[in-house]
Amino acid sequence: MISFRPENGRTLLRSRRMDNSPGLWCPLLHPIYKSKGAGPPSVIPRRPGPDGQGFHLFHEVGALVFDIGSFSVRAGYAGEDCPKADFPTTVGLLAAEEGGGLELEGEKEKKGKIFHIDTNALHVPRDGAEVMSPLKNGMIEDWECFRAILDHTYSKHVKSEPNLHPVLMSEAPWNTRAKREKLTELMFEQYNIPAFFLCKTAVLTAFANGRSTGLVLDSGATHTTAIPVHDGYVLQQGIVKSPLAGDFISMQCRELFQEMAIDIIPPYMIAAKEPVREGAPPNWKKKEKLPQVSKSWHNYMCNEVIQDFQASVLQVSDSPYDEQVAAQMPTVHYEMPNGYNTDYGAERLRIPEGLFDPSNVKGLSGNTMLGVGHVVTTSIGMCDIDIRPGLYGSVIVTGGNTLLQGFTDRLNRELSQKTPPVGDRPDRGPGLALQDPVLPPSPIARLLATRADPSPCGFPDFPTSSPVPSRNPGVCFPQPLFPPRACG
């Protein structure tokens, strides 16, 4: 467990032992909290603690980890088992003059706008409310909306003052320097945080799996990306992106429903429904006096129905799609929110096949988009030949789209000639593992930027690599505080 506490301007780190015994604090070499004096940080000598090992017991105040993705926002204290906050990145937007009244749960008013943030606030139908995302291509585009999300996270989930906690925030590997500088200025000037560190999502994912070298395959909502990481560094020249991801699968599901003449009715429209036979028309009653919701908000509610269908029905075939083989596969029964229900057979295998073989998708014949297997091999092929075996030997899958049944089995099959089995974790879902102790505490603390560490341009010079220069995760720590987590 990693956490920080200010004491006389010093930074202390706490690590919890594997046997759940009381954690220990050890001084770090870099004071990340602001101090009145100027000048370079001083080395803090270790003093013998109660156990004679040079550690000290203190109350725990944790550093915060923010992982803001295209689909969801996750934030929490470093070292905890799960994030404090996990809610959609999409927010509802309403003009202030149309809202009025007191600020309710999940509402943030800024400059004539009201942002409806979090699951409950977003699902309330409102007249004219639009939905939007602060991110575009994995990078922050709408800073006003992004600030509203941070405000909501601090006030409703973290429930603590920002100036009490250092912040580690993930960023896209292709993020620009201008956006990094603007984010740094925002966190220091608006939120007055004591220390800040930006780290590539792929590097954090690799560390969470106990590796500093590997090929991170991130298949999320908007894109599937292969990102090579070597000794904790992202190899920019080897990044390969494909638009075949979760949103693409949702579009294919929507087309399937249109072909089968199935109406997508979101739950907010349904007042009552009656059970019907399989394949029979639904018998439901629409709510009266519904607000005049916007098209974007209605489509968002419909997409949630489609996403539930994806998670419940779809399956990736363990071999290239064959119509005859798919027809013999067991069917899956699914009921729509309005009561319509039927069995799905070959189509539940045909839709996700587009992730691995785009030629099977209608309208994409002759397209140059790469399937998942080709994304991996193309990315590794763009790296130096000496490190390719290490990348092939450590393919790590992450992202919500990889939770489709059979995804890793199919990927293993396609890469079986070049790589050992893909690293598969049962908790690989969207984003980063906050609880993994592989993130090295001391090196990260030494690289945390403060107000007193500006570059000549006025912004801290964040390293573009990981805080760990060694290939072996086991040497990340100045002392063996705990054994590294098993890979996989």
Image: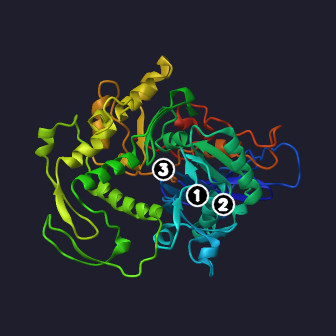
Rate crowding at label 3 as few (under 14), some (14 to 19) or many (20 or more) other CA atoms within 10 Å: many
Q: In this view, does 59 lie above or below 204?
A: below
Question: Disc 3 vs disc 2: which is toward the camera?
Answer: 3
- The residue pinned by badge 3 equals 431
Residue depicted at x 60% and y 66%: 152
Instruction: Give percent across and percent down for residue 126.
Output: 50, 73
Residue depicted at x 48% and y 58%: 81
- The residue pinned by badge 1 equals 23
Q: Which of marks 1 and 2 is nearer the N terminus?
A: 1
Name the amino acid type tagged 1. Gly
Instruction: Give percent across and percent down for residue 78.
Output: 57, 55
223 or 132, nearer to the observer: 132
Q: Is residue 407 visible?
A: yes
Q: Which of marks 3 and 1 is nearer the N terminus?
A: 1
Name the amino acid type tagged 3. Gly
* Tag shown at residue 340: none
Residue depicted at x 26% and y 65%: 336
Q: In which quarter of the image is the N terminus?
A: bottom right
The residues tagged by marks 3 and 2 sit, at their Cα atoms, a distance apart of 32 Å
Rate crowding at label 1 as few (under 14), some (14 to 19) or many (20 or more) other CA atoms within 10 Å: some
The residues tagged by marks 1 and 2 sit, at their Cα atoms, a distance apart of 7 Å
Instruction: Give percent across and percent down for residue 300.
Output: 43, 61
475 or 412, nearer to the observer: 412
SS label for mark 2: loop
- The residue pinned by badge 2 equals 57
SS label for mark 3: loop
